[in-house]
Amino acid sequence: MTRRRRGLDHFARRARKENYPARSVYKLEEIDRRVGLLRRGDLVLDLGAAPGSWTLYAAQQVGPEGLVVAVDRVPLAGPLPGNVVAIEADALTAAPATLLERISGRRFDAVISDMAPATSGSRFVDQNRSFALFCRALEIALEALAPGGRFVGKLFQGGDFEAARDLVRAGFDRARVLRPRGVRSESYEIYLVGLSRRALPDRDCGEGAFELE
């Protein structure tokens, strides 16, 4: 009988068995199941894609007629399917116009971001850094998405949570907050989802409130 490796929970063991680089794939899987985030034939932009679990899942969902553009400063782990284009770049500085060139000037159907800062040990500092990453991902999404497009981004819940909610509501017809089962119990990360991109003026960070689901 083999012993379970210490520190690996159910999701980590499942990811290893199913050949995903990280357990985070099951967070995206649940979000997708609950809101219909990814569809066959979609063009998807994955920001902060390494090590690649979200990219692989998205590639499976969009199928061979779809395409995933994966952006990260470091290479993705392992071989990638043919419907993935990997770009080594910093998502914080990458120009949306440059990313759109990879799909011949068309716009994306979905933008997904699991970006998180390297934790400092200070919850306040980490929340602020997470909010900056979230805002940048949303900024890119609002510029790169087609009308009706979809967005999901990770945020460390804190004082900027309400401002993040208002930003999503300003740009999308529907906004939701989800905390998938794959989020570790000690973590304060949540996912903000925008459904059906509006053609409205973009806003700076504002104020508001979300209810967790």
Image (tube, rainbow, N blue to C red):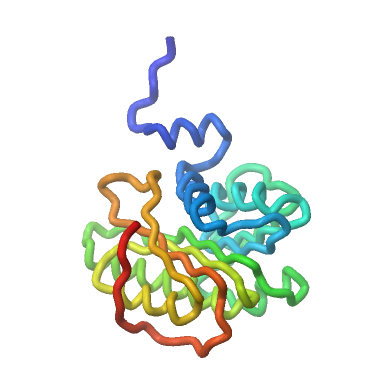
Q: What residue is at 37 percent from the left and 73 percent from the top? A: 165
Q: Is residue 157 left or right of residue 117?
A: left
Q: Residue 121: where, in percent of width, then height?
A: 23, 57
> Which quadrant of the figure has residue 46?
bottom right
Q: Residue 203: where, in percent of width, then height?
A: 44, 87
Which quadrant: the C terminus?
A: bottom left
* Total numbered labels placed on residues in the image: 0
Q: What residue is at 51 percent from the left and 57 percent from the top? A: 35
Q: Specify whether residue 126 is in view.
A: no
Q: Is residue 210 left or right of residue 80?
A: left
Q: What residue is at 55 percent from the left and 61 percent from the top? A: 72
Q: Is residue 137 left or right of residue 163?
A: right
In the depicted view, which residue is nearer to us: 171 or 132?
Answer: 171
* Residue found at the very far bottom of the displayed protein: 201
Q: Residue 7: where, in percent of width, then height?
A: 34, 32
Q: Is residue 37 above or below residue 76?
A: below
Q: Is residue 184 above or below residue 198?
A: above
> Which quadrant of the figure has residue 146?
bottom right
Q: Is residue 173 above or below residue 115?
A: below
Which quadrant: the N terminus?
A: top left
Q: What residue is at 45 percent from the left and 49 percent from the top? A: 27
